[in-house]
Image: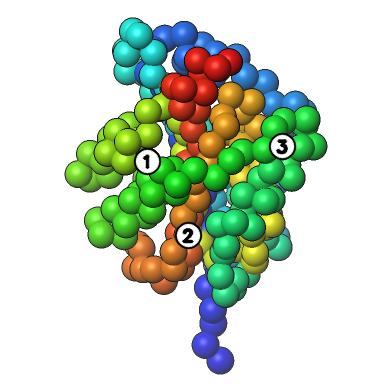
Amino acid sequence: MKKTLIFAFIISGVIVIGLKVAIDYYNYVPPEKIFILNDNNASSDKNTEIINNNILKSDNNYNNESTSSAGPVKVRPELLGKSQFLDPTKIVFELNNERRLYNLPNLTTSVLLTSSATLKIQDMIANDYFSHNSPNNLNLENIMNQIGYDFALAGENLAYGDFKDERALVTAWMESDKHRANILNDKFKDIGISTQRSKINNKETWIIVEHFGLSKNDQVVQ
C-alpha cells in the first residue's frame, strides 16, 4: 500500500518600519499565556512546523527595522488532513470568531489585500520558495506598494501543507504566539487571504497567504 505523507509548515511575519513600531510590537502581550504543544508521539511524516513572524509599518521616520523571530515548533497532528479545498471566506470567518472571543472587531475582507496575497502565492510558486522574502526581493513592503494599498500597518501569515480544514488551519496559527499576535492585533482592520494547491519544495500541497492591514485613511480616523 502506498504511504501518504501529510505535512504542513506555517510562517508568520511582521516587518516594521520605524523604531516606535518595533517597540510597540515587542510590548504586545497576547490575552493569555501561549504554550507550544509538543507532539512526541507523532510519526515523522505528520509533523507540522510554525516558523517565524513579521509586521510592516509606515511612519514619518521610515526607518527599516525587522522583528522576525522564533524557530520551528510542532503542531498537533490531528490538525492535519487531506482537505479538498481551503476557502478564504471560511478562513476569515474562523479568524473573526477568534477575535470576537477577545472583544475585537471583525476584520473586513479587502480586495487589495486579497490581490496582494495572491501575488505572494504566485511568486512563491514561480520561484519555488516558502518565506517572507522572495529570491527576487519581492517582500511584503514591495507587494503592498505594487498593489496600491497605502498602509499604516501590515502583517503576513504564511502556511503550506495538508490541513484538515479551515478551522484546523486557524487553530494551528492560534497555537503559535507570533501568528496569534497578528490575528489578535487590535490595530488591523483589513484582511486578504489567498489559497492555492500547487507544487512547492517538490511537494504538491496547499499554500495559504494571509495579509493583514491598516490603511493610512483608517489610521487618520482613529
Q: Nearer the viewer, residue 175 or 216?
A: 216
Which residue in the structure is indicated by mark 2?
Answer: 195
**Amino acid at dot 3:** Arg
The answer to whether residue 47 is seen in the rendering is no
Which residue in the structure is indicated by mark 3?
Answer: 99
6 is higher (above) or lower (below) than 217: below
Pick whichever of labels 1 and 3 is earlier in the sequence. Answer: 3
Q: What x and y, as percent, mark residue 23?
A: 51, 11
Question: Label 1 vs label 2: CA separation?
Answer: 16 Å
Q: What x and y, as percent, mark residue 210?
A: 50, 46
Q: What x and y, as percent, mark residue 38?
A: 68, 48
Label 2 CA crowd tier, 10 Å (few <14, some 14–19, many 20+): many
Q: What x and y, as percent, mark residue 191?
A: 53, 41
154 is higher (above) or lower (below) than 38: above
Pick whichever of labels 1 and 2 is earlier in the sequence. Answer: 1
Taking the spot 42% from the left edge, 9% from the top edge, the residue there is 19
Which residue in the structure is indicated by mark 1?
Answer: 132
Taking the spot 47% from the left edge, 59% from the top edge, the residue there is 195
Check disc 3 and report its element: helix, strand or loop.
Answer: helix
- Asked where in the image residue 35 lies, by quadrant, the reply is top right
**Amino acid at dot 1:** His
Q: Residue furthest bottom?
A: 1
17 is higher (above) or lower (below) than 157: above
**Amino acid at dot 2:** Thr
Question: Label 1 vs label 3: CA separation?
Answer: 24 Å
In the rendered image, which quarter contains the N terminus?
bottom right
Label 1 CA crowd tier, 10 Å (few <14, some 14–19, many 20+): many
Check disc 1 and report its element: helix, strand or loop.
Answer: loop
